[in-house]
Image (spheres, rainbow, N blue to C red):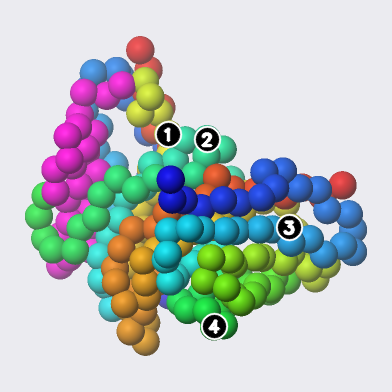
């Protein structure tokens, strides 16, 4: 079955540490997205990528970085510059940037500070 | 920027009908999505509207008025499993691509 896989499900970060959240999809989708979800805040866009080797900042990109070296993979690094990283992180994909298609979401990674 | 408003929380009784509203102010509007999200889980797609009118899918229907910047999700014959958060997302065009912006979500609680 095709889908999006996020790992790990739970992640803990120490002060001053960078951590990387994995997102892999086998839907052959061109577009991929990272969202952060806090209670009462809905989904806020961190980064998105419309094609391999290209990505754009979303509304809250500060303290985060991404790469898109393969179509299937869009990892998110939460750097030490992100002072309030505790949140639920969701990865999503859609068919392409030229189509207005619904997004498919992974099951999320819950990040906490130790 | 985008401004998408939804009520924070709604309650309803099992078997009843509930309407969840969403209003938006956006330029380059290119469609509106509704998603359902159970606590701690991934959002799942419910419906999509790009033209004015009502789209029906079983117990769920979604309505759009582009001139009024208004949409609603209608849930009929409510079941306990419908207790979830409902997310309104507006798609807008930017440089030829479509970037969805989400509202804060409406938490629906269904009582027996």
Callout 3: helix, strand or loop? Answer: loop
- Mark 2 neighbour class, 10 Å CA radius: few under 14, some 14 to 19, many 20 or more: few
Q: Which residue is mark 2?
A: B39
**Pointer 2 indicates a residue of which chain?**
B
Q: Which residue is mark 4?
A: A54
Residue segment shown in magenta:
B55-79
Residue A1 can be seen in this image:
yes
Callout 2: helix, strand or loop? Answer: loop
Give the quadrant of residue A46: bottom right
Cα–Cα gap, marks 2 and 1: 7 Å
Measured as percent of width and height from the top left, residue B41 is found at: 52, 39
Quadrant (top left, top right, bottom left, bottom right) of the C terminus of chain B: top left
The reply to whether label 3 and label 1 mark residues of one chain is no
- How many marks are shown on the rendered structure? 4
Which label sits on residue A85?
A: 3
Mark 4 vs mark 1: give the one in front. 4
- Vertical side of A55 occupied by A7: above or below: above
Image side of residue A110 versus residue A39, left or right: right
Which label sits on residue B84?
A: 1
Give the quadrant of residue A98: bottom left
- Vertical side of A84 occupied by B75: above or below: above
**Pointer 4 indicates a residue of which chain?**
A
Measured as percent of width and height from the top left, residue B74 is found at: 21, 38
The reply to whether label 4 and label 1 mark residues of one chain is no
Cα–Cα gap, marks 3 and 1: 25 Å
Cα–Cα gap, marks 4 and 2: 32 Å
- Which residue: 44% across, 41% down? B37
Residue occupying the far top of the picture: B112
CB atoms at circles 4 and 2 under 8 Å apart?
no
Callout 4: helix, strand or loop? Answer: strand
């Amino acid at each position: 079955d095709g889908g999006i896989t996020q790992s790990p499900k739970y992640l803990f970060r120490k002060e001053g540490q960078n951590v990387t959240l994995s997102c892999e999809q086998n839907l052959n989708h061109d577009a991929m997205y990272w969202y952060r979800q806090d209670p009462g805040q809905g989904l806020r866009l961190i980064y998105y990528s419309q094609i391999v080797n290209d990505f754009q900042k979303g509304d809250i990109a500060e303290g985060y970085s991404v790469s898109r070296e393969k179509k299937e993979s869009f990892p998110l690094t939460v750097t030490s510059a992100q002072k309030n990283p505790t949140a639920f992180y969701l990865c999503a994909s859609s068919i392409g940037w030229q189509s207005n298609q619904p997004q498919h979401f992974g099951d999320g990674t819950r990040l906490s500070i130790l | 920027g985008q401004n998408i408003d939804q009520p924070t929380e709604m309650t309803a009784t099992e078997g009843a009908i509930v309407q969840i509203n969403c209003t938006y102010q956006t330029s380059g509007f290119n469609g509106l999505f509704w998603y359902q999200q159970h606590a701690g889980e991934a959002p799942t797609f419910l419906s999509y509207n790009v033209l004015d009118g009502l789209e029906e899918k079983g117990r769920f229907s979604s309505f759009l008025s582009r001139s009024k910047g208004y949409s609603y999700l209608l849930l009929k014959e409510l079941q306990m499993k419908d207790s979830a958060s409902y997310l309104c997302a507006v798609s807008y065009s930017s440089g030829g691509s479509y970037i969805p912006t989400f509202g804060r979500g409406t938490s629906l609680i269904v009582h027996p």
